[in-house]
Image (cartoon, rainbow, N blue to C red):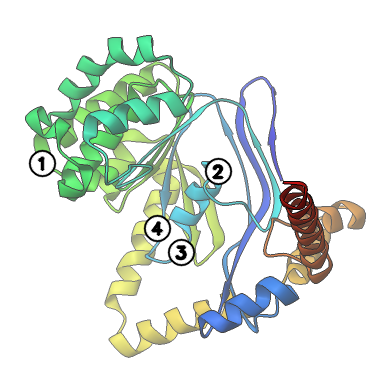
Amino acid sequence: MTKQTQTDDLMVRAESITKNFQLYANQSEKLKSTFMGNQSETNFWALRGLTFDVNVGDVVGIVGTNGSGKSTLLNILSGVIPQTSGSLELNGSIGVVAINEGLNWELTGRENIRIKQLMMGKSNKEITAAMPDIIEFSELGEFIDQPVKDYSNGMRAKLGFSIVTHNNPDILIIDEALSVGDSNFSQKALGKIKEFIKEGKTIFFVSHDLNQVREFTNKVMWIQYGEMRDFGPTKKVADEYEKFVQDLDHMSEEKRDHYVEDQKHLQRIFTLEQLQDRLVRAGLPLDRARAIVTVRSFEGFSAFALYTALAIILGLMAIVIYFYLAKEQRL
């Protein structure tokens, strides 16, 4: 469940957010699940009960080893995918800066700017006025009128960053977009982020560059294989995470592989019942805990819903065909 809230300084509140991806051996299994409901024997819980509050002006660095759920969380925050359970409250418009985020590869850079800005609620007049600034900031020059499919990753990142930041969102989500492209543009982009920080914008910042995280953020969220390991002041959490990574690097390859496999196994066997028990042990009333874990996203049709929808569609088709044939007979 995603809500809009107007709590004073609160920009984002997440309560026990989970995300389950069902893994299928082949396409026939996936098709079967559409007709029969979710029958997958293999679940993968990318997120396992994340809870946090983020206030106006917070700049939150999100860290974690590869595959820990950082991008999944950002996709949920930005509305690209729904959470499986838990509640999410947002207060403000959201802009996402990520490589290839929302770009139509068949269109030119200029056309992408117009479409993205229209989707963000801008009028054609406003877009035309802002177009020169967006193009200039992107540094794409004559490439702005070339199809995006011909761009490098760095060029796409430049275009995406320029579009989103010129829309002036309340909440800015940056997912590794500054790790590509030339250093000059990266510095310019970081300068733009500093402007947003001074303006009191709320920012989620995913980066493997811990120095950047330390420089720009006031809080760090450490997600490790779908679980919140820590969330708090930047220095404290960044130091903890840095030590963890160093310990991981010092492991033998066999021991590290064993650790990773153990963590992924826990993600496969996780259940919402486990989360409910954990919430109750933490002091949450049973009814409230049960409500949190049963707020489910759309994860495929139930059989009843599917058959009902098919019956309605077939009935409408029959009516159309009946009237069409009746009209032909009269002619």
Q: Earlier in the sequence, mark 2 or mark 4?
A: 2
Whether residue 180 appears in this view of the structure is no
* Above/below status of 120 relative to 278: above
Mark toward the viewer: 4 or 3: 3
Query: Count of labels shown?
Result: 4
Q: Name the residue tied to disc 1.
A: 182
Q: Residues within 10 Å of mark 4 (few under 14, many from 20)?
A: many
Q: Quadrant of residue 192?
A: top left
Q: Nearer the viewer, residue 12 or 59?
A: 12
Q: Callout 1 environment at 10 Å: few (<14), some (14 to 19), or many (20+)?
A: few
* Badge 4 element: helix
Residue type of the residue flagged with mark 2: Gly
Q: Position of residue 53 (x, y in %)?
A: 62, 38
Q: CA distance from mark 2 to mark 4?
A: 28 Å
Secondary element under disc 1, as helix, strand or loop, is loop
Mark 3 or 1: the one toward you: 1
Q: Along the polypeptide, which appears first: circle 1 or circle 4?
A: 1
Residue positioned 63% across, 54% down in the render? 83
Three-letter amino acid code at the position of disc 3: Ser
- For marks 1 and 4, give the one nearer the viewer: 1
Residue in view at x 29 percent, y 47 percent: 99
Task: Please name which of the two marks, 2 or 3, marks the residue nearer to the observer.
Answer: 2
Query: How far apart are labels 4 and 3 at the CA level?
Result: 13 Å
The tag earlier along the polypeptide, 4 or 3, is 3
Q: Is residue 296 above or below residue 130?
A: below
- Residue placed under numbered mark 4 in the picture: 241
Looking at the rendered structure, which numbered label has been put on residue 68? 3
